[in-house]
């Protein structure tokens, strides 16, 4: 997750860095374009007028681009502030400050520019300038008026000369007068406006000037006409028209029109004055629009500069804040435990130094954590190994703190002390003792040693539970404590019960074997000798002596027979023939044995499994039959004084762990049950509560069961005795043995 | 009633404020194998245009003429286009209104603005197109439009002050001709 965050962060950084050159690049291109256009435009005003709309358009586009970019940036900043993203507050404050710093001088510059421009434009149109131009125009006009008056006088003289001339002379006279008067054209118009005669300085192709209606009308009314006319080729010309003759004469309807050129020098000056006057009038007309357009242009430039400044503020803020944001994000990641976080920084300033230091710190932290993790894994591995060893130990191991708080207990300790001690780790042993008698006895046995001053000690003691007797040997070692803390005591103890039991069984087997060997041999001669004595002497003795002999030899034979049975039993116990394992149907064997014993004593109610299903076990059929016989015999003998004797035999297959792979055989009767004082030695040889018993029945049964890899237990359940036998169903179960967990379920138990 | 009076007053005010600017009459006339345009315009100047003229800013009259042939299923065929431009200015030294045909360079000066506008308003025998370009019996449409601009202004000013009336333009005056 942290890696994803880091990737996302880097991705966002990359996007920002891609977006910045895009916007900045577009703006730079526009700026360069505008500068190039300005460079071209400033060469002359015509170019400027042509390019100014494009410059304005480029400015407007730049403003739009910047506005779009800024709206995006502001929206991004707003989102970051709402999400409380680290650094967003610093970013917004920096943008605000930088923008304000840029805005203030821009506004001042704008205000002064507008002021200077408007004042400057207004200063162009001072009254003195206008008046001066008007005076210049008047002066030019006066100079031209002099010329015009002179040219009118010339025209009038020519008209007087032509007044009484015949038509034949007109062409010649007109040519002469034109040359003498320095006129461009002289044209004599008839009463209908038709040309009567003309003389022109220009080529014939140029044609004759036409006479406008106003000139004709003015001349005919007797008013001489004189005017200054703009020439098509530039400059001016002076036109004059005079009527010939008096108003009442017939020739008065003819009009002479003369066109005079304005002297070049005068024409140039007049044209310049006129042009300046016209230009000034045009500028005067444009004064307000120009001022307005300048203000608008300045506003546009101001807006663009302002937007560019704000965008620049974003740009530089990004450069400033982004590494800090990266550091904040990386710090958070490190706080969450991601020491692989690195901040990308290329700058060589203080922030770059900070980034480098941070990266070095996280690298060291990562190394330290890796080393710690490695050490922890080693410790865990060793701990797991130790736990496995402890779990597999048949020796019980406990560690106790000074206040007897249980810190560690292996499984064997719990099994020996009859309590699940692993569930009580962290509790005081004194607190566990009341609910677990064996633990209480164990604590009572070791307490004096624990309270003593010896650090290492060894003690053997016996624990007695209900139907249980355990011989333990316990060794204690005190581990040194850390600092002021007291040391921990480690107690290691072994259950010697099994060892002692095995030793006892071995001794009993040896006894039995010797008995069988040493006693059985002389019995037969004794018996034979007694019978021979009886046979030889019985007929020769008096009746009274014969009776004594009879009774004595009979007793000898009977006792010898009894001794033979006893010796046979011992022999049977000591004998250990090889068993032949095969799959046997236990239920069938049970029913078979039950039928046999029921026939012997119909009074006893023997209940056997009615389930027809076979319960198969891996056993020696003959030895298993002997087990059943011994168990049923044991029960029958116990039921002799019972009014409604009943024996219940049950079998069932244990399913699943624990105990899977074993068959449980239960023989239960409603007799008096086992005597409590015999419970812990019930399966020992020669232990019996019956007057006639040898005490070897249950011992033989346990021996056979153990040879099969099974287990046997005896207890009193309800109103009678109960014996349970577990037998394996196959070789695998036989090899694995009955799991310990099955053993822990029982409180009273004898182990093979 | 009151509304009607108000409407009439508003109309009168509008008419007083905005002198009529339009095309009163126009026709073409074949002469010597050439179609010639004759038209009479109504060139009422707005107050802004008069002010501009008085200040020395020239006015430009643009006459756009189009001849097209209508087709049933296809767009109309543009047969001829003609644009004539005249500039009307005031020469302060000569104290005369000068009309210059910017297409031909011909120039005429008038003593008054009325005379100059009258001269501009009467389009006479303006050669439009050669008659050989037209098919006899076909129907052609001739369209005429006049535009009066206040000239000599920087384009940037026109762009920035776009809300001002820098020009007036008539609707297209269209009529059909069948050679």
Image (spheres, coloured by chain):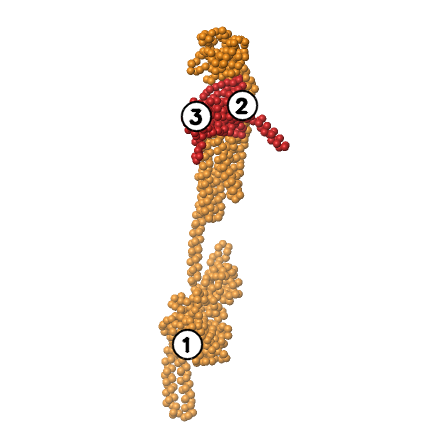
Per the image, label 1 sits on a secondary structure element best described as helix
Determine which of the numbered discs, if any, sits on residue A377 in the image.
none
Question: Which chain identifier belongs to the red chain?
Answer: B
Q: Mark 3, residues whose alpha carbon is within 10 Å: few (<14), some, or many (≥20)?
A: some
Name the chain under label 1: A
Select label 1 or label 2 by which is in front: 2
Are the numbered discs 1 and 2 placed on the same chain, yes or no?
Answer: no
The residues tagged by marks 3 and 2 sit, at their Cα atoms, a distance apart of: 35 Å
Residue at the (49%, 37%) spot, across then down: A69
In contact (CB < 8 Å): disc 1 and disc 2: no
Where residue A363 sits, quadrant-wise, is top left
Q: Nearer the viewer, residue A519 or A134?
A: A134
Residue indicated by mark 3: B129
**Chain letter for the orange colouring in the rendering:** A
In the image, residue A229 lies at what x, y percent? 50, 16
Give the letter of the chain under mark 3.
B
Q: Are marks 1 and 3 in contact (CB under 8 Å)?
A: no
Residue at x-position 49% and y-position 14%: A193
In which quadrant will I find the C terminus of chain B?
top left
Q: Nearer the viewer, residue A623 or B44?
A: B44
**Relative vertical location of residue A710 with respect to residue A426 in this rendering, above or below:** below
Q: Nearer the viewer, residue B25 or A498?
A: B25
Disc 2: CA contacts within 10 A as few (<14), some (14-19) or many (>=20): many
Residue at label 1? A592
Q: Position of residue A544 (x, y in %)?
A: 43, 92
- How far, Cα to Cα, is label 1 from label 3? 140 Å
Position of the N terminus of chain B, as image quadrant, is: top right
Residue highlighted by disc 2: B52
Where's residue B81, x and y in %? Answer: 44, 27
Which element carries disc 3, helix, strand or loop? strand
Can residue B152 be seen by looking at this rendering?
Answer: no
């Amino acid at each position: 997750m942290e890696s994803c965050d880091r990737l996302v962060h880097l991705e966002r950084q990359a996007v920002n860095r891609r977006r910045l050159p895009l916007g900045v690049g577009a703006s730079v291109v526009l700026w360069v374009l505008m500068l190039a256009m300005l460079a071209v435009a400033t060469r002359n005003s015509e170019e400027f007028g042509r390019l100014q709309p494009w410059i304005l358009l480029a400015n407007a586009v730049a403003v739009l681009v910047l506005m779009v970019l800024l709206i995006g940036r502001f929206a991004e900043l707003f989102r970051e502030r709402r999400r409380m993203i680290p650094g967003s507050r610093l970013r917004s404050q920096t943008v605000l400050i930088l923008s304000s710093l840029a805005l203030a001088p821009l506004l001042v510059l704008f205000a002064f520019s507008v002021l200077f421009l408007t004042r400057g434009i207004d200063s162009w149109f001072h009254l003195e300038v206008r008046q001066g131009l008007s005076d210049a125009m008047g002066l030019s006009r006066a100079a031209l008026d002099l010329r015009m008056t002179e040219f009118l006088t010339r025209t009038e003289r020519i008209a007087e000369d032509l007044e009484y001339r015949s038509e034949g002379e007109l062409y010649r006279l007109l040519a002469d007068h034109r040359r003498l008067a320095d006129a461009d054209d002289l044209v004599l118009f008839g009463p209908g406006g038709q040309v009567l005669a003309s003389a022109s300085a220009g080529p014939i192709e140029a044609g004759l000037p036409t006479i406008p209606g106003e000139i004709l009308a003015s001349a005919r009314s007797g008013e001489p006409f004189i005017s200054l006319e703009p020439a098509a080729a530039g400059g001016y010309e002076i036109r004059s028209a005079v009527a010939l003759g008096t108003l009442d004469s017939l020739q008065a309807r003819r009009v002479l029109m003369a066109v005079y050129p304005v002297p070049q020098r005068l024409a140039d000056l007049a044209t310049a004055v006129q042009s300046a006057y016209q230009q000034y009038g045009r500028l005067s007309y444009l004064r307000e629009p120009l001022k307005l357009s300048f203000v608008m242009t300045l506003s546009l430039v101001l807006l663009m500069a302002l937007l560019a400044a704000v965008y620049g503020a974003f740009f530089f803020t990004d450069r400033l804040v982004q590494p800090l944001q990266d550091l904040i994000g990386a710090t958070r990641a490190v706080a969450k435990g991601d020491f692989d976080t690195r901040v990308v920084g290329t700058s060589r300033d203080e922030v770059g130094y900070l980034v480098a230091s941070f990266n070095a710190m996280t690298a060291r932290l990562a190394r330290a954590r890796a080393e710690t993790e490695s050490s922890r894994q080693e410790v865990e591995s060793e701990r797991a190994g130790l736990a496995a060893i402890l779990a597999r130990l048949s020796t019980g191991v406990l560690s106790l703190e000074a206040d007897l708080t249980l810190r560690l207990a292996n499984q064997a300790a719990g099994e020996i002390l009859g309590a699940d001690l692993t569930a009580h780790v962290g509790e005081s042993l004194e607190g566990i003792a009341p609910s677990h008698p064996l633990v209480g006895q164990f604590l009572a046995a070791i307490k004096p040693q624990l309270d003593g001053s010896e650090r290492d000690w060894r003690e053997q003691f016996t624990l007695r539970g209900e139907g249980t007797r355990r011989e333990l040997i316990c060794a204690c070692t005190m581990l040194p404590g850390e600092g002021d803390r007291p040391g921990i005591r480690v107690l290691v103890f072994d259950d010697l019960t099994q060892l002692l039991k095995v030793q006892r069984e071995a001794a009993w087997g040896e006894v039995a074997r010797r008995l069988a060997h040493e006693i059985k041999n002389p019995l037969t001669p004794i018996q034979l000798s007694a019978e021979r004595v009886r046979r030889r002497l019985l007929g020769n003795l008096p009746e009274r002596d014969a009776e004594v002999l009879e009774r004595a030899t009979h007793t000898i034979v009977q006792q010898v027979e009894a001794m033979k049975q006893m010796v046979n039993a011992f022999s049977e116990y000591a004998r250990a023939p090889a068993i032949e394992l095969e799959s046997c149907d236990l239920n069938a064997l049970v029913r078979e044995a039950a039928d046999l014993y029921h026939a012997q004593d119909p009074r006893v109610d023997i209940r056997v499994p009615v389930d027809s299903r076979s319960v198969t076990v891996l056993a020696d059929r003959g030895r298993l039959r002997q087990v059943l016989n011994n168990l049923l015999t044991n029960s029958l003998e116990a039921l002799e004084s019972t009014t409604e004797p009943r024996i219940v035999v049950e079998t069932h297959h244990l399913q699943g762990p624990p105990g899977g792979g074993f068959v449980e055989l239960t023989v239960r009767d409603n007799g008096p049950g086992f005597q409590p004082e015999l419970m812990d030695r019930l399966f020992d040889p020669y232990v019996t509560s019956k007057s006639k018993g040898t005490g070897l029945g249950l011992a033989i049964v346990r021996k056979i069961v153990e040879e099969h890899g099974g287990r046997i237990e005896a207890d009193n359940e309800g109103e009678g005795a109960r014996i349970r036998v577990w037998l394996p169903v196959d070789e695998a179960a036989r090899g694995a043995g009955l799991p310990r967990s099955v053993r822990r379920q029982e409180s009273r138990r004898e182990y093979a | 009633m009151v509304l009607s009076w108000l409407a009439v007053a508003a109309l009168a005010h509008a008419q007083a404020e905005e002198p009529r600017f339009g095309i009163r009459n126009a026709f073409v006339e074949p002469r010597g194998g050439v179609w010639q345009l004759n038209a009479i315009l109504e060139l009422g100047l707005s107050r802004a245009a008069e002010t501009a003229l008085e200040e020395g800013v020239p006015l430009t009259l643009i006459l756009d003429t189009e001849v097209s042939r209508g087709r049933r299923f296809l767009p109309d065929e543009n047969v001829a286009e003609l644009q004539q431009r005249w500039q009307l200015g005031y020469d302060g030294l000569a104290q005369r209104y000068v009309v210059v045909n910017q297409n031909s360079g011909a120039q005429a000066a008038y003593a008054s603005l009325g005379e100059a506008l009258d001269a501009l308003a009467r389009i006479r025998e303006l050669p439009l197109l050669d008659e050989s370009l037209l098919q006899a019996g076909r129907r052609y449409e001739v369209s005429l439009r006049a535009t009066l601009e206040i000239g000599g202004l920087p384009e940037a000013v026109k762009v920035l002050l776009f809300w001002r009336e820098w020009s007036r333009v008539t609707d297209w005056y269209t009529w059909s001709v069948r050679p």
